[in-house]
Each structure stands twice: as structure tokens, then as C-alpha cells.
Image (spheres, coloured by chain):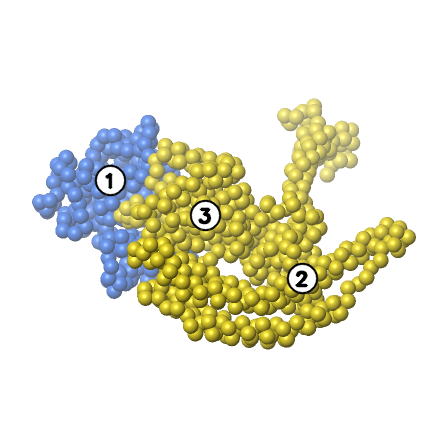
Chain colours: A yellow, B blue
Amino acid sequence: MKTRSNETAPENEAAATPPPDGTNPGAHSPFAGSRSPLAPDSAQAVRRSLAARGIRAFFGSTALVSLLILTLITIFLFREGLPFFGASQREIALYRQAGLEYIDILRRAETGHIGLVRQLSDIRLRAFQHFVETGHLAVSDANARLAAFDNFADRFSDAIGPVRGLVSDIGEAATGIKTRAAVENDKAIQRQQLLDAGKASEAGQIKIEPVDFQKEIKPILDTLPACRDALRSTADELRAILAAAPSFDGRSLAARMETFQKRARAYIAALPGIENELSGWTPSEPVRWHASIVSFLTGREWITASFWQDWYGILPLFTGSLLASLIALAIAVPFGVGAAIYTSQVAARREQSLIKPAIEFISALPSVVLGFFGIAVLGELLRSLSQSPWLDWLPGFPIIERLNALTAGCLLALISMPTIFTLAEDALTNVPRALREASFALGASRLQTTLRIITPAALSGIISAVLLGFGRVIGETMVVLLCAGNRIAIPDFSAGPAVVTQPVHTMTGIIAQEMGEVVRGSTHYRALFVVGMTLFILSLAINYAAQKILRRYRLPSA
Amino acid sequence: MVSAPAAISSDSQTTTRMSAGNITFFPPQPASPASDGPGSESRAPGLIEIAGLDFYYGEKKALDGINLSIEANRVTAFIGPSGCGKSTLLRCLNRMNDLIEDAGIRRGSIKIGGADINARGVDPIELRKRIGMVFQKSNPFPKSIYENIAYGLRIQGFKNKAEIDSRVEASLRNAALWNEVNDRLHDNALGLSGGQQQRLCIARALAVEPQVILMDEPCSALDPIATAKIEELIHELKKRYTIIIVTHSMQQAARVSDRTAFFYLGRLVEYGGTRAIFMNPSNPQTEAYVSGRFG
């Protein structure tokens, strides 16, 4: 450094470090006479770095804001949802303390019997059809031939009388206890709120009479001998009635009667079990800590605003969502992947420029419009199509319900098409050209190259495309709400492939449908949030899996 | 040249449907000892005869009036600066340019074994089964080593497992790769080193028993040791195959080839014995290029 020898030079960096030959740098520099723009302290540089920092901060903060909002949504979802388990736990405890559980055990005897009676009426209907259509009997003659059967069925149906009477009697008592407990609980909450607000005198006016469950439940427990007698007498009577069961000549009717008798005997054999359960039941037994989680995850019923007991079981909604989504994928995957293979491997450039925007345009359709179309056109179309005689070999045809999982699935397929097509097409197009050429150079045809080289090489991308399509449809709300039929019940998978024609309700649909009507903070409200949480976790898992698959099996870049 | 089988007609208009089975597409060539130097220039028709070839990418002329005769069982090198059309010409020989839209031959002909490969009715798939190709960047399929080679056999209709096995082994031996991979045939080919991958690609081309092997800068992505191995392999292979190699490395052309063609701006500038091209070029452009003054 020759700073000292150059003290007269202007105070800037360029002059402070003159070239070794000692000449004035200004003489050679193109920046002669002006401050060097390379100097870090020049005003321009400072301004530029400030601007750069500002731009950085702007983009950084937008990213941060979206992250923050996502976090807040997640926190909100969990904060509103998680108390569900506590509330539900208390409800289940009350369900036991008030004796509702006891009655539901007894009621099982009644519901089992109802199923059998329904089977009997089904047999009667078939027998009647058989006599009228195949045997060419007049209606009155057919009824006459069924007189013995009707007599049997009536007696069978009446045999449950004692149990039914008991259920309705003690049922009222139990709901009475439950209601009182709920009222007292509300009062306690109200008083606590007043105390918190510092209104001690008003709080003192609220008198709470805690429900003495042990005393209240006594009358219910006292019915145990009566229950036992009712169950036993029902069993005896049913056995006697069954012994004199009428028989049919037709082979299929006889077979049906046979299965009925088998089921009826199994039912009678199960009655002592119910009796044992009743006598073993104690209202004071504490509810297990995971009861609410178990009842949510494995509950087969979603019953709300019931006078008896609300149940929040996610299974019917989950299976409904899954069924509709799987139908959608079963349709969309062959079409989407097929279209992607065609577009990326076979189509000429002009075809590509037609097909790609067309399929991508589908995602521009508002789903409510699709749902509307489903109700107004597709549902009706499918049903009238299913009634044509040359299609009745298809499972589930003719369709009974106009709106069902199939209707929703068809539209969901349309919704997932763009996702699956676009991503699969990308994956196929991104297979290195070198692989294509290598295959062609070996004398492979276009088809062989596509099926044996390109598609396997793009498989991970195609799988993740399908997964993301799945994520897209399982989160879709409007279409399923409008078109899936909204029956809250686990679809009857014993129907085989015909299960697709049953109406279902979905996780997204239930939230959209019920969220507007629930009391804020109620158990039902929180249950809907837990359903939302489940959806959230499910989508997260699907997306994560899709990315994982894509990463793990990624080809080395070309 | 031995008389061609009756099915092969030199008339390019005759539609000759070539099949892998009974018709020999290329007539057998007399095995001539690979000689070198200016004295070996002969005017006998070669295995591949290119006459007056013009090739266009869209409206851009990439090859301009190429006349070239390539002899059987020799290594012919195509050299020249980037964009001179040497790779394009190579890809004309197995009609890989068919895959490019708007590109094609406008004039001239390519005859291999006397038959016009661009004649109507010639199936490019059949043609490519007879003319193997090795690419600039090794491009094994993302499958096992075994499957990489078996693929070509399977698409040619081989079904017998024992036969496929033996052919896989034979071609790996021919590509001097067998000793390195015989214990991991079912591992993914992408786990091999660059040089091994390139030899695998050569083995893959050899498995279907082509008559001609086209190599498009096969060593440009390899280190010197892997390059030496491939060059050694080329020496071995020319006993049984006709090899055409495009290369940017003058030393490589000098080392491996018997004859060299120098291309510049889509034209064939000079063609002759490799020694003649490098030691005593007749064209000043050739001289400037091989001595490294441009390119």
C-alpha cells in the first residue's frame, strides 16, 4: 500500500490502491474523473444494495406470510377439533351413567329381531311374485296360499313384544336422567361464567342440584329380572314358532326359508349372551380413556341431534369418501394415463396443442356447475340407461337411487382428469430422449418403446400423478355434496361391485352440510373439525407419499 | 462383390419388405484385410454407398451433395467441427432422423448392400435391427444389466430363456464387460460407471447381431482410461462388424479408424485412408483442421 505517498489523491478506493508502477490510475481508467462504480461506498451502490434488500424482503415476507397462514389454519383446526375427544368422552360417560348403554344392550335383541322380520317380509314378497307370475294364480288365491305363512310371520313378529315394551319404558327413564344431568351441567357452566365475570350475587341465585346417578339409576337396574324374563320368554316363544315354520315347494324359496331359520336360530342362541351382558353391566364402571377416539375412528354410525345419544363415527363418511374417490380413479386413471401416453408419445404437435389445453380446461369448470350437471343430467341419464334391458347384466343395474356413489364418481373422475393427465404427461415427456432413441435404434417399434421403456421409466411420476389426483378428489366437496346421495351409512360391500350404485355421504360433504347449522363449541361442531383434521392429515399423507415416490425413483437427469 | 440374393433388387423403386428371417438384407462381403495408406484406395463399390445426398432440417440445409462409399469390416471415422453434419449423416444411415419432424432427405440416395434404405416399403424398424447404434452419452435403460441386453432380443421375438441367457453373456463378453459384471447381472445398470455403461450400450447393440455399428462420439463423456478400453474394443469388433464412428478427437480418429471422412459446413471435404488424411491431406481446409488450426 502506498497510501501515504499518495495523500493528495481523492479519498476513494480506486485512488487508494494505485497500480504498482505508481502512475495515476485515472489516466488509464475508463472511469477517469468520476467515482469508481466498483467502490462499495458509492451512493449508487448503497442505493442498489438497499433496493436489492428491499426486494428480497418483499419476496421473503410473502413466502413467510403464506407459511404463517398455513400454520395458523393448522393450529386453528387442531384447537377447535381436539377438545372433541374430551367432550365426547364426557358424553360417553353420561351415556353409561344414565343407563342408556344398558338399554342399548337390551335393544340389540330388538334390532336383531327387526332384521329377521324384514327378511320374512322379503320372503313373502318373493313368494307372492312366484305364485302370481310363475304359478299364474290370481292375487286373492296367492294371498290365500300365503295365509299360513302370514300367520307364522305375524306370530314371529309379535314375539318380541315384552322386550320392546321394556325398552320403551326404561328408555324414558334413562333419557330423563340424561336430560336432567345436561340441564344441571349447563347451569354449572352458567354459574362459572357469572363468577368469572365477577357477578357473585347472580351466580349465587343459580342453584345446582347435582344428579345422584346411583339413586336415579336404581329403577333401571331393578328391571333386570324383568328383562331376563322377557328375553327368556321371547326365546322360548320364538323357538316354538320356528318349530312350526311353514315350508315352500319352490327350490329358491325353500332355500331362503332355510337361511332364515338358520339366522333365526343363531339369533335365539345369542339372546342369553345379551342377558349375561345386562347382568354384568355396572353404571359406575369408568369409561376407558380412549373410548372417544375408538368410537370416532371405528364408529359405524354418525347420528347427530338425536334425542337418545349422538354418535360421531367417521367410518360411514370415510368409506363413502373412499368409495367415491376409488370409482373416480378407476375411471380417470385409464383415461388420464392413456391420454397422457398418447399425447406425449404418439400425437403430432398440432394434436398436442389441441388435446392439452382441452383437458386442462376441465379444471376451469367450477365444481358446483359439474355438480349441477350431475343432478340434472348425469344422474337421470345413468338411471334411465341402467333400466334398459340389455344392460341389466351389469352389477347394480337397474340403479335404484338416482344420486349415488357412481354418479359422484363419474364427475370426480372428470375433476381428477386434468391433474392426472398433466402430471403423467410431464413425467412421460421428461423421460430422457436418449432412452427413446436407444430403443428405436435397437429396432423397437413406437408401441414397444412406449410400453416397455418410456412408461416403466415414467412409472414413479405416473404413480405420483395418480396419488395427487386421489388427493384432489378426496378433498372435493361440491360434487359429492350434490351428487353422492348423502345417505350416512357404510355402503353394503356384500353387494359386490353393485356397491357403487349405493348413495353415500362423504367427509367433505358432511362438513359443508352441517357446519352451518351446528352450535358453535358443541360436541357436534368439534366433531366436524375432527373430520376436517382427518381430511387434512389424509391429504398431507397422500401428497407426502406422492413426493416421496417421485424422489425415490427419479431417473438420473438426462 | 458376391452376387446379391434374388430378393434384393438394386432398383430403388421396387418395394422390398425386409424381414429378419429368410432374407439377407446385406450380402456377405469378402473379408478384405484392413489395409491402410494411399495405396489402398480402390474404386470397388462399398457396403454403404451414399450418392448426392442433400438433407434438410426444415428449410436449413444440413448436408449438401454427399458422395461416400464405406467399406465393410473397416472403421470409418467422420470428423469435422461442430455443426458440420457428421452426426446427421450417421443418423441418416439407420433412419433415426425419421423421428425428427420436418427433417428429411430431399435428394440423393443411401444404399446399403445395394438396397436403397429410403425406398418405399423399407421398414425402418427392420433396418435398425441390422444397424446398431451407440450414442454420445451412455443411455442404458433404467433396468437391470441383463434386461438392458435382453430387451433388444425380446423385441426381435426371442422367447427361449436359455438362448437369451447365452446371447446376453456372449454380447457382454464381446463388449469386454462380462468379467466386470457377471456377478451382478440383475443389478440396475445405472449403478455402473460411465465407461461400463457405454460398453453396456455397445453390448446391447451387439446382442441383436447387426452388420453395421454406428458410434456417435462414443467416448466424449468418458475419461482417458475408459476411452482406451472402448478403443481397444473397437479394434476387436472391426473383425466382425463394419463400424462408423463420429468423433471430435483427432487422436481418436487417427488411432482407431482405417478411413477418415472430413466434413465442413455440410459438405464432404476429403475422404481417404486415415494415414493419408492426417499425414498428407490434399485439401488445405483438411490440413488446417487436422493440425488443429481451427475447429
Q: Are marks 2 and 1 in contact (CB under 8 Å)?
A: no
Amino acid, disc 2: Glu
Rendered position, A488 above or below A1: below
Where residue A169 appears, as percent x and y from the top left, is 65, 64
Rendered position, A293 above or below B134: below
Q: Which numbered disc flags the more N-terminal residue, 3 or 2? A: 2
Residue at the far right in the pictured view: A201
> Which residue, given by chain and number where applicable, does mark 3 sit on?
A401
Visible residue check, residue A347 = yes
In the image, A204: left or right of A254? right
Q: Are marks 3 and 2 in contact (CB under 8 Å)?
A: no
Where residue A15 appears, as percent x and y from the top left, is 72, 31
> Which residue, given by chain and number where applicable, does mark 2 sit on?
A172
Q: Residue at x 44, y 54 (%)?
A: A499
Toward the viewer: A35 or A49?
Answer: A49
Looking at the rendered image, the disc whose residue lies closer to the viewer, 3 or 2, is: 2
Looking at the rendered image, the disc whose residue lies closer to the viewer, 2 or 1, is: 2
Toward the viewer: A499 or A110?
Answer: A110
